[in-house]
Amino acid sequence: MKDRIRYAPLRDKITDPATAAAHIVDGTNVFISGFTAGYPKMIPMELARRAEQGENFKINIYAGASTGELVDGLLSNTDLVNWRRPYMSDRTMRKKINNNEILFKDDHLSRLSSLVRCGDWGAVDVAVVEAVAITEKGHLVPTMSVGNTPTYVKHADKIIIEMSQSDPQGLEGIHDIFIPEDPPYRMPIPLYRTADRIGKPFIEMNPDKVVAILESGEKDTCAVFQSPGEIPLRIGEQILDFVRHEMKQDRLPKTLPWQAGVGDVSNAVLSRFMEDDFFQSVDLYSEVIQDSVLDLIDMGKIRAASASAMTLSEKARDRFFKEIYRYREKIILRPVEISNSPEVIRRLGVIAINTALEADIYGHVNSTHVMGSQLMNGIGGSGDFERNGALSFMVTPSMAKNGAISAIVPMVSHVDHSEHSVDVIVTEQGLVDTRNLTPRQVAEAVIKKCAHPDYRDLLWDYYSRAVHKVGGHEPHLLGEAFSFHQRFMETGDMKI
Ligand code: 0RQ
Protein backbone atom coordinates (compact mmCIF):
# COMPACT_ATOMS: atom_id res chain seq x y z
CA MET A 1 0.00 0.00 0.00
CA LYS A 2 2.91 2.37 0.70
CA ASP A 3 3.55 2.87 -3.02
CA ARG A 4 0.03 4.29 -3.29
CA ILE A 5 0.72 6.86 -0.54
CA ARG A 6 3.36 8.93 -2.32
CA TYR A 7 3.21 11.69 0.31
CA ALA A 8 5.44 10.00 2.88
CA PRO A 9 4.25 11.78 6.08
CA LEU A 10 0.78 10.27 5.61
CA ARG A 11 2.13 6.71 5.79
CA ASP A 12 2.11 7.09 9.59
CA LYS A 13 -1.67 7.38 9.45
CA ILE A 14 -2.17 3.79 8.31
CA THR A 15 -4.28 2.13 10.97
CA ASP A 16 -7.03 -0.44 11.63
CA PRO A 17 -10.80 0.08 11.07
CA ALA A 18 -11.68 0.28 14.79
CA THR A 19 -9.15 3.06 15.44
CA ALA A 20 -10.24 4.94 12.32
CA ALA A 21 -13.96 4.61 13.04
CA ALA A 22 -13.49 5.88 16.61
CA HIS A 23 -13.69 9.37 15.06
CA ILE A 24 -17.36 8.65 14.29
CA VAL A 25 -19.75 8.78 17.26
CA ASP A 26 -23.43 9.45 17.93
CA GLY A 27 -24.58 12.44 15.86
CA THR A 28 -21.51 12.70 13.62
CA ASN A 29 -22.11 14.12 10.15
CA VAL A 30 -20.35 11.63 7.88
CA PHE A 31 -19.76 12.77 4.29
CA ILE A 32 -18.74 9.86 2.09
CA SER A 33 -17.40 9.41 -1.41
CA GLY A 34 -19.54 7.40 -3.78
CA PHE A 35 -21.83 7.87 -6.73
CA THR A 36 -23.14 4.38 -7.56
CA ALA A 37 -19.47 3.26 -7.21
CA GLY A 38 -16.39 4.38 -5.33
CA TYR A 39 -17.94 4.41 -1.85
CA PRO A 40 -16.10 3.41 1.36
CA LYS A 41 -16.66 -0.10 2.69
CA MET A 42 -14.37 -0.70 5.69
CA ILE A 43 -15.77 2.08 7.89
CA PRO A 44 -19.44 1.15 7.33
CA MET A 45 -18.57 -2.47 8.17
CA GLU A 46 -16.82 -1.37 11.36
CA LEU A 47 -19.74 0.88 12.35
CA ALA A 48 -22.14 -2.02 11.77
CA ARG A 49 -19.92 -4.25 13.93
CA ARG A 50 -20.09 -1.70 16.75
CA ALA A 51 -23.87 -1.50 16.46
CA GLU A 52 -24.18 -5.29 16.48
CA GLN A 53 -22.11 -5.36 19.67
CA GLY A 54 -24.72 -3.17 21.33
CA GLU A 55 -23.36 0.36 20.95
CA ASN A 56 -26.27 2.74 20.64
CA PHE A 57 -25.57 5.53 18.13
CA LYS A 58 -26.85 7.10 14.93
CA ILE A 59 -25.07 9.09 12.24
CA ASN A 60 -26.07 11.44 9.45
CA ILE A 61 -24.80 10.12 6.16
CA TYR A 62 -24.27 12.21 3.04
CA ALA A 63 -23.03 10.69 -0.23
CA GLY A 64 -22.85 11.71 -3.91
CA ALA A 65 -25.83 9.57 -4.93
CA SER A 66 -26.66 5.88 -4.45
CA THR A 67 -24.01 3.62 -2.93
CA GLY A 68 -23.93 -0.15 -2.48
CA GLU A 69 -25.07 -2.85 -0.11
CA LEU A 70 -22.08 -2.19 2.17
CA VAL A 71 -23.19 1.37 2.90
CA ASP A 72 -26.93 1.98 2.55
CA GLY A 73 -27.92 -1.66 3.06
CA LEU A 74 -25.66 -2.40 6.00
CA LEU A 75 -26.14 0.91 7.81
CA SER A 76 -29.93 0.74 7.42
CA ASN A 77 -30.11 -2.86 8.56
CA THR A 78 -28.19 -1.96 11.71
CA ASP A 79 -30.35 1.12 12.34
CA LEU A 80 -27.41 3.49 12.23
CA VAL A 81 -28.83 6.17 9.96
CA ASN A 82 -30.56 9.29 11.23
CA TRP A 83 -30.35 11.52 8.11
CA ARG A 84 -29.47 10.34 4.56
CA ARG A 85 -28.97 12.67 1.57
CA PRO A 86 -29.22 12.59 -1.49
CA TYR A 87 -30.48 9.87 -3.98
CA MET A 88 -30.43 6.28 -2.75
CA SER A 89 -31.73 3.02 -4.21
CA ASP A 90 -31.45 0.48 -1.39
CA ARG A 91 -34.61 -1.50 -0.55
CA THR A 92 -34.16 -1.53 3.26
CA MET A 93 -33.26 2.14 3.35
CA ARG A 94 -36.26 2.94 1.14
CA LYS A 95 -38.55 1.10 3.55
CA LYS A 96 -37.16 2.96 6.57
CA ILE A 97 -37.41 6.32 4.81
CA ASN A 98 -41.04 5.59 3.99
CA ASN A 99 -41.66 4.55 7.62
CA ASN A 100 -40.14 7.88 8.67
CA GLU A 101 -37.39 6.02 10.56
CA ILE A 102 -34.68 7.61 8.37
CA LEU A 103 -34.88 11.31 7.54
CA PHE A 104 -34.41 11.96 3.82
CA LYS A 105 -34.77 14.94 1.51
CA ASP A 106 -34.69 14.74 -2.26
CA ASP A 107 -32.55 17.25 -4.18
CA HIS A 108 -31.24 17.92 -7.68
CA LEU A 109 -27.75 16.40 -7.58
CA SER A 110 -26.11 19.38 -9.29
CA ARG A 111 -26.91 21.69 -6.36
CA LEU A 112 -25.58 19.69 -3.46
CA SER A 113 -21.88 20.54 -3.33
CA SER A 114 -22.67 24.23 -3.36
CA LEU A 115 -25.19 23.79 -0.51
CA VAL A 116 -22.55 21.97 1.53
CA ARG A 117 -19.96 24.69 0.85
CA CYS A 118 -22.48 27.30 1.97
CA GLY A 119 -22.98 25.39 5.24
CA ASP A 120 -26.61 24.41 4.54
CA TRP A 121 -26.02 20.78 5.50
CA GLY A 122 -24.24 21.54 8.76
CA ALA A 123 -20.65 20.89 9.75
CA VAL A 124 -18.66 18.42 7.68
CA ASP A 125 -17.40 16.52 10.72
CA VAL A 126 -15.76 13.58 8.97
CA ALA A 127 -15.21 12.78 5.29
CA VAL A 128 -14.74 9.07 4.56
CA VAL A 129 -13.43 8.60 1.05
CA GLU A 130 -12.14 5.82 -1.14
CA ALA A 131 -8.95 6.50 -3.11
CA VAL A 132 -6.47 4.77 -5.41
CA ALA A 133 -3.54 7.00 -4.50
CA ILE A 134 -2.26 10.02 -2.59
CA THR A 135 0.03 12.19 -4.72
CA GLU A 136 3.53 13.44 -3.82
CA LYS A 137 1.97 16.71 -2.59
CA GLY A 138 -0.68 14.94 -0.48
CA HIS A 139 -3.65 15.22 -2.83
CA LEU A 140 -6.25 12.53 -3.34
CA VAL A 141 -6.89 10.39 -6.44
CA PRO A 142 -10.43 8.97 -6.20
CA THR A 143 -11.61 5.60 -7.56
CA MET A 144 -14.55 4.96 -9.90
CA SER A 145 -16.58 8.04 -9.05
CA VAL A 146 -16.15 11.71 -8.12
CA GLY A 147 -19.64 12.81 -6.97
CA ASN A 148 -19.38 15.46 -4.24
CA THR A 149 -16.05 14.20 -2.87
CA PRO A 150 -13.97 17.30 -3.76
CA THR A 151 -16.24 19.51 -1.64
CA TYR A 152 -16.52 17.00 1.20
CA VAL A 153 -12.72 16.71 1.37
CA LYS A 154 -12.26 20.47 1.19
CA HIS A 155 -14.67 21.21 4.03
CA ALA A 156 -14.14 18.23 6.33
CA ASP A 157 -12.69 18.69 9.80
CA LYS A 158 -11.29 15.16 9.63
CA ILE A 159 -10.62 12.87 6.66
CA ILE A 160 -10.51 9.06 6.72
CA ILE A 161 -9.18 7.42 3.56
CA GLU A 162 -9.87 3.87 2.42
CA MET A 163 -7.01 3.06 0.06
CA SER A 164 -8.40 0.59 -2.47
CA GLN A 165 -6.08 -2.24 -3.39
CA SER A 166 -8.51 -3.63 -5.95
CA ASP A 167 -8.86 -0.56 -8.17
CA PRO A 168 -5.83 -0.03 -10.42
CA GLN A 169 -3.55 2.97 -10.10
CA GLY A 170 -4.11 3.43 -13.83
CA LEU A 171 -7.29 5.30 -12.83
CA GLU A 172 -5.02 8.25 -12.10
CA GLY A 173 -5.53 10.73 -14.92
CA ILE A 174 -9.16 9.84 -15.67
CA HIS A 175 -10.58 12.45 -13.25
CA ASP A 176 -10.99 16.16 -13.96
CA ILE A 177 -11.59 18.05 -10.72
CA PHE A 178 -12.90 21.60 -10.87
CA ILE A 179 -14.85 23.31 -8.08
CA PRO A 180 -16.96 26.18 -9.44
CA GLU A 181 -17.60 29.43 -7.64
CA ASP A 182 -20.53 29.88 -5.28
CA PRO A 183 -23.41 32.36 -5.41
CA PRO A 184 -23.83 35.24 -5.70
CA TYR A 185 -20.72 36.00 -7.80
CA ARG A 186 -20.40 32.94 -9.99
CA MET A 187 -18.18 33.08 -13.06
CA PRO A 188 -18.95 30.73 -15.99
CA ILE A 189 -17.72 27.14 -15.82
CA PRO A 190 -15.14 27.08 -18.66
CA LEU A 191 -16.33 23.84 -20.26
CA TYR A 192 -17.24 24.27 -23.92
CA ARG A 193 -16.92 20.73 -25.36
CA THR A 194 -17.62 17.30 -23.84
CA ALA A 195 -13.94 16.36 -24.02
CA ASP A 196 -12.63 19.54 -22.33
CA ARG A 197 -10.53 19.07 -19.22
CA ILE A 198 -10.80 22.14 -17.02
CA GLY A 199 -9.35 21.06 -13.67
CA LYS A 200 -6.79 18.86 -11.99
CA PRO A 201 -6.43 15.06 -12.10
CA PHE A 202 -6.70 14.89 -8.29
CA ILE A 203 -8.81 16.26 -5.44
CA GLU A 204 -6.96 18.98 -3.54
CA MET A 205 -6.60 17.91 0.08
CA ASN A 206 -5.01 19.33 3.18
CA PRO A 207 -3.02 16.28 4.41
CA ASP A 208 -3.06 17.66 7.98
CA LYS A 209 -6.77 16.81 8.15
CA VAL A 210 -6.20 13.11 7.45
CA VAL A 211 -6.72 11.19 10.70
CA ALA A 212 -6.61 7.63 9.39
CA ILE A 213 -5.81 5.57 6.31
CA LEU A 214 -7.11 2.03 5.85
CA GLU A 215 -6.03 -0.64 3.43
CA SER A 216 -9.13 -1.91 1.61
CA GLY A 217 -9.47 -5.01 -0.50
CA GLU A 218 -13.25 -4.60 -0.78
CA LYS A 219 -14.84 -4.08 -4.17
CA ASP A 220 -17.92 -2.11 -5.24
CA THR A 221 -21.08 -4.16 -5.65
CA CYS A 222 -21.35 -4.41 -9.41
CA ALA A 223 -24.34 -3.50 -11.51
CA VAL A 224 -26.22 -6.33 -13.14
CA PHE A 225 -27.24 -5.61 -16.71
CA GLN A 226 -29.37 -8.07 -18.62
CA SER A 227 -29.42 -7.90 -22.37
CA PRO A 228 -32.16 -5.36 -22.98
CA GLY A 229 -35.69 -6.78 -23.20
CA GLU A 230 -38.20 -6.09 -25.92
CA ILE A 231 -39.74 -3.03 -24.24
CA PRO A 232 -36.48 -1.11 -23.58
CA LEU A 233 -35.28 -1.96 -27.09
CA ARG A 234 -38.52 -0.70 -28.64
CA ILE A 235 -38.23 2.54 -26.62
CA GLY A 236 -34.59 2.93 -27.63
CA GLU A 237 -35.35 2.30 -31.28
CA GLN A 238 -38.04 5.00 -31.35
CA ILE A 239 -35.73 7.55 -29.75
CA LEU A 240 -32.97 6.93 -32.28
CA ASP A 241 -35.46 7.01 -35.19
CA PHE A 242 -36.82 10.33 -33.93
CA VAL A 243 -33.42 11.96 -33.38
CA ARG A 244 -32.10 10.66 -36.71
CA HIS A 245 -35.10 12.19 -38.44
CA GLU A 246 -34.65 15.55 -36.65
CA MET A 247 -30.97 15.59 -37.60
CA LYS A 248 -31.65 14.69 -41.24
CA GLN A 249 -34.16 17.57 -41.38
CA ASP A 250 -31.45 19.89 -39.99
CA ARG A 251 -33.55 20.65 -36.93
CA LEU A 252 -30.92 19.25 -34.59
CA PRO A 253 -27.13 19.45 -34.99
CA LYS A 254 -25.51 16.05 -35.48
CA THR A 255 -22.86 16.57 -32.84
CA LEU A 256 -25.02 17.11 -29.75
CA PRO A 257 -23.90 15.01 -26.78
CA TRP A 258 -26.20 12.45 -25.16
CA GLN A 259 -27.19 11.73 -21.56
CA ALA A 260 -28.94 8.56 -20.51
CA GLY A 261 -29.99 7.79 -16.93
CA VAL A 262 -29.21 4.54 -15.17
CA GLY A 263 -31.04 1.34 -16.11
CA ASP A 264 -32.15 -0.97 -18.87
CA VAL A 265 -33.63 1.65 -21.18
CA SER A 266 -30.43 3.71 -21.19
CA ASN A 267 -28.40 0.63 -21.87
CA ALA A 268 -30.80 -0.30 -24.67
CA VAL A 269 -30.52 3.13 -26.31
CA LEU A 270 -26.75 2.97 -26.19
CA SER A 271 -26.68 -0.59 -27.50
CA ARG A 272 -28.85 0.55 -30.44
CA PHE A 273 -26.06 2.98 -31.36
CA MET A 274 -23.89 -0.05 -32.08
CA GLU A 275 -26.12 -1.23 -34.89
CA ASP A 276 -26.83 2.21 -36.29
CA ASP A 277 -24.64 3.52 -39.11
CA PHE A 278 -26.02 7.06 -38.85
CA PHE A 279 -24.52 7.68 -35.38
CA GLN A 280 -20.81 7.20 -36.03
CA SER A 281 -19.13 9.61 -33.65
CA VAL A 282 -21.00 10.21 -30.42
CA ASP A 283 -20.26 12.37 -27.37
CA LEU A 284 -21.76 11.35 -24.03
CA TYR A 285 -22.24 14.07 -21.43
CA SER A 286 -23.94 12.05 -18.74
CA GLU A 287 -23.73 11.29 -15.04
CA VAL A 288 -22.98 7.59 -15.19
CA ILE A 289 -21.06 5.46 -17.69
CA GLN A 290 -22.46 1.93 -18.11
CA ASP A 291 -21.24 -1.26 -19.83
CA SER A 292 -22.44 -0.38 -23.31
CA VAL A 293 -20.12 2.64 -23.41
CA LEU A 294 -17.09 0.31 -23.38
CA ASP A 295 -18.54 -1.56 -26.39
CA LEU A 296 -19.07 1.72 -28.20
CA ILE A 297 -15.51 2.82 -27.45
CA ASP A 298 -14.24 -0.51 -28.82
CA MET A 299 -16.25 0.08 -31.99
CA GLY A 300 -14.68 3.53 -32.37
CA LYS A 301 -18.08 5.25 -32.02
CA ILE A 302 -17.35 7.39 -28.94
CA ARG A 303 -15.51 10.68 -29.28
CA ALA A 304 -15.64 11.44 -25.57
CA ALA A 305 -17.59 10.11 -22.59
CA SER A 306 -17.94 12.45 -19.61
CA ALA A 307 -19.70 11.46 -16.36
CA SER A 308 -19.35 11.49 -12.60
CA ALA A 309 -19.02 7.72 -12.18
CA MET A 310 -18.65 4.38 -13.86
CA THR A 311 -21.34 1.80 -13.05
CA LEU A 312 -20.12 -1.44 -14.59
CA SER A 313 -20.99 -5.11 -14.37
CA GLU A 314 -18.24 -7.35 -12.99
CA LYS A 315 -17.28 -8.55 -16.46
CA ALA A 316 -17.11 -5.01 -17.85
CA ARG A 317 -15.11 -3.80 -14.85
CA ASP A 318 -12.48 -6.51 -15.40
CA ARG A 319 -12.29 -5.57 -19.05
CA PHE A 320 -12.01 -1.86 -18.21
CA PHE A 321 -9.26 -2.45 -15.63
CA LYS A 322 -7.30 -4.64 -18.06
CA GLU A 323 -7.22 -2.00 -20.78
CA ILE A 324 -7.55 1.10 -18.68
CA TYR A 325 -4.85 3.01 -20.56
CA ARG A 326 -6.86 2.73 -23.78
CA TYR A 327 -10.27 3.56 -22.27
CA ARG A 328 -8.87 6.40 -20.22
CA GLU A 329 -8.26 8.43 -23.38
CA LYS A 330 -11.99 8.65 -24.02
CA ILE A 331 -13.42 8.84 -20.48
CA ILE A 332 -13.50 11.82 -18.10
CA LEU A 333 -14.90 11.60 -14.55
CA ARG A 334 -16.02 14.93 -13.07
CA PRO A 335 -17.62 16.26 -9.88
CA VAL A 336 -21.39 15.87 -10.13
CA GLU A 337 -21.84 19.65 -9.97
CA ILE A 338 -20.00 19.74 -13.33
CA SER A 339 -21.35 16.55 -14.96
CA ASN A 340 -24.88 17.70 -14.06
CA SER A 341 -24.36 21.45 -14.28
CA PRO A 342 -27.47 23.12 -15.77
CA GLU A 343 -25.17 25.79 -17.25
CA VAL A 344 -22.99 23.26 -19.05
CA ILE A 345 -25.86 20.96 -20.08
CA ARG A 346 -27.59 23.91 -21.69
CA ARG A 347 -24.40 25.20 -23.33
CA LEU A 348 -23.54 21.82 -24.86
CA GLY A 349 -27.14 21.12 -25.91
CA VAL A 350 -27.40 17.69 -24.34
CA ILE A 351 -29.99 15.18 -25.61
CA ALA A 352 -31.41 13.88 -22.32
CA ILE A 353 -33.14 10.54 -21.72
CA ASN A 354 -34.58 9.80 -18.28
CA THR A 355 -37.08 7.37 -16.81
CA ALA A 356 -40.51 8.06 -15.31
CA LEU A 357 -42.63 6.03 -12.96
CA GLU A 358 -45.67 7.68 -14.52
CA ALA A 359 -46.55 10.55 -16.85
CA ASP A 360 -49.88 12.27 -17.13
CA ILE A 361 -51.86 13.08 -20.23
CA TYR A 362 -50.51 16.67 -20.22
CA GLY A 363 -46.86 15.62 -19.90
CA HIS A 364 -46.11 16.14 -16.20
CA VAL A 365 -43.88 13.39 -14.83
CA ASN A 366 -43.46 11.55 -11.54
CA SER A 367 -40.10 9.77 -11.23
CA THR A 368 -39.89 9.39 -7.49
CA HIS A 369 -43.06 8.64 -5.50
CA VAL A 370 -45.18 5.52 -6.04
CA MET A 371 -48.89 6.35 -5.70
CA GLY A 372 -47.85 9.84 -4.65
CA SER A 373 -46.59 8.84 -1.21
CA GLN A 374 -43.94 6.15 -1.23
CA LEU A 375 -40.41 7.24 -2.17
CA MET A 376 -38.75 5.05 -4.77
CA ASN A 377 -35.14 6.34 -5.15
CA GLY A 378 -35.08 10.10 -5.62
CA ILE A 379 -34.86 12.58 -8.47
CA GLY A 380 -31.11 12.01 -8.90
CA GLY A 381 -29.80 13.88 -11.89
CA SER A 382 -32.92 13.50 -13.98
CA GLY A 383 -34.14 17.04 -13.24
CA ASP A 384 -30.75 18.59 -14.03
CA PHE A 385 -30.82 17.04 -17.49
CA GLU A 386 -34.54 17.12 -18.35
CA ARG A 387 -34.95 20.82 -17.56
CA ASN A 388 -31.80 21.94 -19.34
CA GLY A 389 -31.31 19.51 -22.22
CA ALA A 390 -31.67 20.71 -25.81
CA LEU A 391 -34.11 17.85 -26.33
CA SER A 392 -35.49 15.97 -23.32
CA PHE A 393 -37.02 12.51 -23.52
CA MET A 394 -39.01 10.96 -20.70
CA VAL A 395 -39.40 7.22 -21.10
CA THR A 396 -41.41 4.51 -19.36
CA PRO A 397 -42.98 1.16 -20.17
CA SER A 398 -46.70 1.89 -20.72
CA MET A 399 -47.68 -0.42 -17.81
CA ALA A 400 -46.21 -1.71 -14.55
CA LYS A 401 -46.99 -4.63 -12.23
CA ASN A 402 -48.20 -6.96 -14.98
CA GLY A 403 -50.66 -4.44 -16.32
CA ALA A 404 -52.28 -3.51 -13.00
CA ILE A 405 -50.76 -0.01 -13.26
CA SER A 406 -50.96 2.34 -16.23
CA ALA A 407 -47.88 4.54 -16.55
CA ILE A 408 -50.08 7.10 -18.32
CA VAL A 409 -52.57 8.57 -15.84
CA PRO A 410 -55.00 11.52 -15.80
CA MET A 411 -52.86 13.46 -13.30
CA VAL A 412 -49.52 12.38 -11.84
CA SER A 413 -49.67 11.68 -8.12
CA HIS A 414 -46.39 13.58 -7.52
CA VAL A 415 -44.59 16.05 -9.81
CA ASP A 416 -40.84 15.92 -10.43
CA HIS A 417 -40.71 17.21 -14.02
CA SER A 418 -43.37 19.57 -15.26
CA GLU A 419 -44.70 19.75 -18.83
CA HIS A 420 -42.28 22.64 -19.36
CA SER A 421 -39.23 20.41 -18.89
CA VAL A 422 -40.34 17.36 -20.86
CA ASP A 423 -40.16 17.52 -24.66
CA VAL A 424 -40.86 13.99 -25.81
CA ILE A 425 -42.76 11.20 -24.03
CA VAL A 426 -41.93 7.64 -25.08
CA THR A 427 -43.38 4.27 -24.19
CA GLU A 428 -43.03 1.02 -26.11
CA GLN A 429 -46.42 1.91 -27.67
CA GLY A 430 -45.28 5.13 -29.29
CA LEU A 431 -43.78 8.58 -28.96
CA VAL A 432 -45.21 12.10 -28.68
CA ASP A 433 -43.19 15.22 -29.39
CA THR A 434 -44.99 17.77 -27.20
CA ARG A 435 -42.94 20.80 -28.20
CA ASN A 436 -45.40 22.41 -30.58
CA LEU A 437 -48.63 21.00 -29.25
CA THR A 438 -51.21 22.64 -26.98
CA PRO A 439 -51.95 20.77 -23.73
CA ARG A 440 -55.17 19.37 -25.24
CA GLN A 441 -53.26 18.18 -28.33
CA VAL A 442 -50.66 16.60 -26.03
CA ALA A 443 -53.38 14.76 -24.09
CA GLU A 444 -55.03 13.43 -27.23
CA ALA A 445 -51.70 12.28 -28.71
CA VAL A 446 -50.41 10.75 -25.45
CA ILE A 447 -53.63 8.73 -24.95
CA LYS A 448 -53.56 7.57 -28.57
CA LYS A 449 -49.85 6.86 -28.94
CA CYS A 450 -48.24 6.25 -25.53
CA ALA A 451 -50.94 4.67 -23.36
CA HIS A 452 -51.34 0.92 -23.40
CA PRO A 453 -54.44 -0.18 -25.40
CA ASP A 454 -55.90 -1.66 -22.17
CA TYR A 455 -56.11 1.86 -20.69
CA ARG A 456 -56.86 4.04 -23.73
CA ASP A 457 -60.66 3.99 -23.38
CA LEU A 458 -60.51 4.79 -19.66
CA LEU A 459 -58.16 7.71 -20.26
CA TRP A 460 -60.20 8.96 -23.19
CA ASP A 461 -63.37 8.79 -21.12
CA TYR A 462 -61.73 10.88 -18.35
CA TYR A 463 -60.30 13.42 -20.81
CA SER A 464 -63.43 13.90 -22.91
CA ARG A 465 -65.63 14.38 -19.84
CA ALA A 466 -63.10 16.89 -18.46
CA VAL A 467 -63.20 18.81 -21.75
CA HIS A 468 -66.99 18.92 -21.84
CA LYS A 469 -67.75 19.44 -18.17
CA VAL A 470 -64.91 21.75 -17.09
CA GLY A 471 -63.06 22.98 -20.20
CA GLY A 472 -60.10 25.30 -19.91
CA HIS A 473 -56.50 25.08 -21.06
CA GLU A 474 -55.74 21.79 -19.26
CA PRO A 475 -59.16 20.33 -18.48
CA HIS A 476 -59.32 18.21 -15.32
CA LEU A 477 -62.07 16.66 -13.22
CA LEU A 478 -60.53 17.38 -9.85
CA GLY A 479 -62.72 14.87 -8.03
CA GLU A 480 -61.54 12.12 -10.38
CA ALA A 481 -58.00 13.13 -11.28
CA PHE A 482 -56.53 10.44 -9.01
CA SER A 483 -59.25 7.84 -9.59
CA PHE A 484 -56.76 5.49 -11.33
CA HIS A 485 -54.48 5.57 -8.27
CA GLN A 486 -57.36 5.23 -5.84
CA ARG A 487 -58.69 2.21 -7.71
CA PHE A 488 -55.27 0.57 -7.59
CA MET A 489 -54.96 1.19 -3.86
CA GLU A 490 -58.42 -0.20 -3.20
CA THR A 491 -58.49 -3.15 -5.62
CA GLY A 492 -54.89 -3.74 -6.71
CA ASP A 493 -55.70 -2.80 -10.32
CA MET A 494 -56.16 0.55 -12.08
CA LYS A 495 -58.58 -1.03 -14.54
CA ILE A 496 -62.27 -1.03 -13.63
O1 0RQ B 1 -40.76 -2.46 -9.21
O2 0RQ B 1 -38.57 -3.23 -8.38
O3 0RQ B 1 -40.70 -4.06 -7.34
O4 0RQ B 1 -40.04 -4.75 -9.66
O5 0RQ B 1 -40.76 0.45 -10.10
O6 0RQ B 1 -39.20 -0.02 -12.36
O7 0RQ B 1 -39.47 -0.57 -14.77
O8 0RQ B 1 -37.70 -1.76 -13.37
O9 0RQ B 1 -37.50 0.67 -14.08
O10 0RQ B 1 -35.37 0.26 -12.72
O11 0RQ B 1 -35.51 1.90 -14.66
O12 0RQ B 1 -36.62 2.37 -12.47
C1 0RQ B 1 -38.15 5.71 -12.35
C2 0RQ B 1 -37.65 4.17 -10.48
C3 0RQ B 1 -37.45 3.42 -12.85
C4 0RQ B 1 -35.75 5.00 -11.90
C5 0RQ B 1 -37.26 4.60 -11.88
C6 0RQ B 1 -42.03 -0.17 -10.35
C7 0RQ B 1 -41.66 -1.40 -11.15
C8 0RQ B 1 -40.40 -1.85 -10.44
C9 0RQ B 1 -38.65 -0.12 -11.09
P1 0RQ B 1 -39.97 -3.73 -8.60
P2 0RQ B 1 -38.45 -0.52 -13.67
P3 0RQ B 1 -36.12 1.26 -13.50
C10 0RQ B 1 -29.82 8.48 -12.98
C11 0RQ B 1 -30.98 9.42 -13.18
C12 0RQ B 1 -35.33 8.72 -11.07
C13 0RQ B 1 -33.89 9.16 -10.97
C14 0RQ B 1 -33.16 9.22 -12.26
C15 0RQ B 1 -35.48 6.25 -11.07
C16 0RQ B 1 -39.73 -0.54 -10.09
O13 0RQ B 1 -35.36 5.24 -13.22
O14 0RQ B 1 -35.28 6.16 -9.87
O15 0RQ B 1 -33.70 9.15 -13.34
N1 0RQ B 1 -35.50 7.44 -11.72
N2 0RQ B 1 -31.90 9.35 -12.11
O16 0RQ B 1 -42.69 -2.35 -11.12
C17 0RQ B 1 -45.74 1.88 -9.20
C18 0RQ B 1 -45.65 2.94 -11.28
C19 0RQ B 1 -44.45 2.20 -11.57
C20 0RQ B 1 -43.99 1.33 -10.57
C21 0RQ B 1 -42.64 1.27 -12.29
N3 0RQ B 1 -46.15 3.79 -12.16
N4 0RQ B 1 -46.23 2.75 -10.09
N5 0RQ B 1 -44.61 1.18 -9.39
N6 0RQ B 1 -42.86 0.77 -11.07
N7 0RQ B 1 -43.62 2.13 -12.62
C22 0RQ B 1 -29.43 8.06 -11.56
C23 0RQ B 1 -28.56 9.02 -10.78
O17 0RQ B 1 -28.86 10.14 -10.67
C24 0RQ B 1 -27.30 8.48 -10.13
Image (spheres, grey):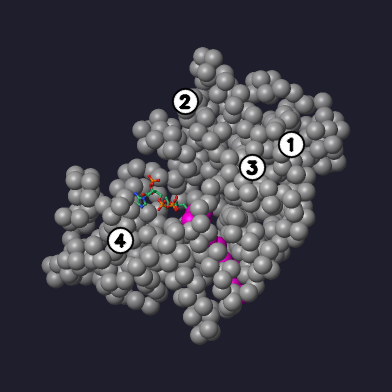
Task: Give the SS element for disc 1.
Answer: loop
Q: Position of residue 279 (x, y in %)?
A: 59, 74
Q: Secondary structure at mark 2?
A: loop
Label pair 1/2, CB-CB below 8 angstroms = no
Question: Of residues 252 and 168, which is closer to you in this image?
Answer: 168
- Residue 38: image tag: 3
Label 1 amino acid?
Gln
Residue 124 visible in the snapshot: no
Q: Position of residue 166 (x, y in %)?
A: 71, 39
Q: CB at mark 2 closer than 8 A to ligand 1?
A: no
* Label 1 – label 3 distance at C-alpha: 12 Å
Above or below residue 288? Residue 76 is above
N-terminal label among 1 and 2: 2
Region in magenta: 255-264
- Determine crowd level at label 1: few under 14, some 14-19, many 20+ residues with C-alpha closer than 10 A: some
The local crowd at label 2, few if under 14, some if 14 to 19, many if 20 or more residues have their Cα within 10 Å, is many
Q: Nearer the viewer, mark 1 or mark 2?
A: 1
Label 4 to label 1, Cα distance in Å? 47 Å
Which residue is drawn at the image coordinates 47% and 39% (left, top)?
Answer: 90
Q: Residue at x 72, y 29 (%)?
A: 214
Pointer 1 residue: 165
Tell me the quadrant of the picture where the C terminus can be found: bottom left
Which of 440 and 457 lies nearest the eye of the viewer? 457
**Where residue 311 sits: x, y (%)?**
59, 49
Confirm or reject: label 4 Cβ below 8 Å from ligand 1.
no
* Residue for badge 2: 79
Circle 4 Cα neighbour tier, 10 Å, few/some/many (<14 / 14–19 / ≥20): many
Disc sitting over residue 408 in the figure: 4
Q: CA distance from mark 3 to mark 4?
A: 36 Å
Amino acid type, label 4: Ile
